[in-house]
């Protein structure tokens, strides 16, 4: 079986976003057990000028959908960033996964040499070759924000382990 | 140009470890400016049962060297985990990058269908197909620990931005 761009991208995004949804379930359960308003967790951050948990999850979604769409040669869907509950963030992640899986894998596979242009903030644009964009922008950014979300919750006391971050990976144990 | 296992692995590891070395430079400068013993930063962690900064950096190194070696069909080098200073951790990262770049890329490319077996803690072993091991174990784990190192330093007050985490990526801006 040959390696491909779609194989390096799509299952990794699906697994990571689905695992993050499970991490949010544990946050929900923690808030219920401790009788904390879940909004407290959603507004937590590791430094005053870092993203809150809500924004980290939205960033994971954005990087994933935008990455898959641009490599697939289609316009990324716009999401409203209006989530205020854990259930809404989980729905956003599920919607993102469904979108990513709908992108034409053959188009992603053919994008290795194509120049990808994408917004960097409100003014600038970035340009990268497709394979570089996948390897050095989409994946590291998605893992960065997914780990930041995990770290915010660990710091807040939620009991999580690496197996929550890597949930569902195709590994046999013996 | 075709996509390949080595292309998805080697430059991503080199960029990530090199960027982490730059993040450690900023930690060193922060400690000097604030007249803090750098060991304080090296022992910081986000939760009592999470890895310290030193262990996060060692984990990045371990996952990267072990991943490249196993995909390349060779025995991973053993490192001593005896680093006590930022300079020693930076040297460890540089040594790791040099090792990764020495692994036969053609062997990595040929490993997509090969079963990779690797220790999981002191007793268990994990088994994954080569492409899955690259996509769903090596890369997410390396990014996880690199982000955790970054997050520890951000939480400690070191001025870092996403561009420090993604330093050196092949992107043009306009």
Image (tube, coloured by chain):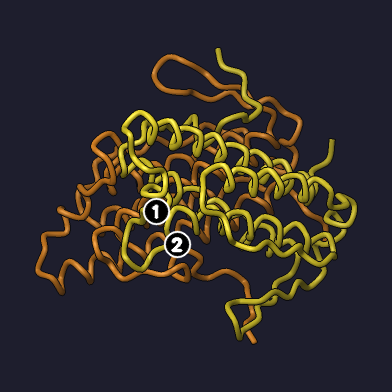
Chain colours: A yellow, B orange
Q: Is residue A15 above or below residue B97?
A: above
Instruction: Residue B164: name its quadrant.
Output: bottom left
Left or right: B6 with respect to B45?
Answer: right
Q: Which mark is residue B18?
A: 2
Q: Are marks 2 and 1 in contact (CB under 8 Å)?
A: yes
| Residue visible at 41% across and 70% down in the picture | B161
Q: Counting residues from the N terminus, which is met first, the one under dot 2 or under dot 1?
A: 2
**Which sits in the foreground, A135 or A51?**
A51
Label 2 secondary element:
helix
Q: Quadrant where the N terminus of chain A lies?
A: top right
| Residue visible at 49% across and 46% down in the picture | B142
Q: Quadrant where the C terminus of chain A lies?
A: top right
Residue assigned mark 1? B93
**Which sits in the foreground, A51 or B122?**
A51
Which of the chains bears the disc numbered 2? B
Q: Can you give x and y, in whole percent of width and height, for residue B93 in the image?
A: 39, 53
């Amino acid at each position: 079986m040959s390696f491909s761009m779609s194989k390096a991208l799509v299952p990794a995004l699906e697994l990571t976003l689905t695992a993050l949804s499970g991490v949010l379930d544990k946050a929900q359960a923690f808030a219920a057990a401790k009788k904390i308003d879940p909004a407290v967790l959603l507004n937590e951050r590791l430094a005053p000028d870092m993203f809150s948990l809500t924004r980290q999850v939205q960033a994971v979604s954005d990087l994933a959908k935008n990455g898959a769409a641009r490599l697939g040669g289609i316009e990324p869907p716009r999401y409203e960033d209006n989530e205020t509950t854990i259930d809404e963030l989980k729905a956003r992640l599920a919607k993102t996964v469904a979108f990513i899986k709908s992108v034409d894998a053959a188009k992603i596979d053919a994008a290795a040499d194509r120049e990808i242009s994408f917004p960097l903030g409100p003014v600038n644009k970035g340009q990268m070759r497709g394979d570089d964009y996948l390897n050095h922008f989409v994946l590291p950014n998605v893992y960065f924000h997914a780990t930041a979300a995990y770290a915010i919750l660990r710091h807040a006391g939620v009991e999580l382990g690496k197996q929550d971050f890597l949930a569902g990976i195709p590994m046999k144990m013996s």
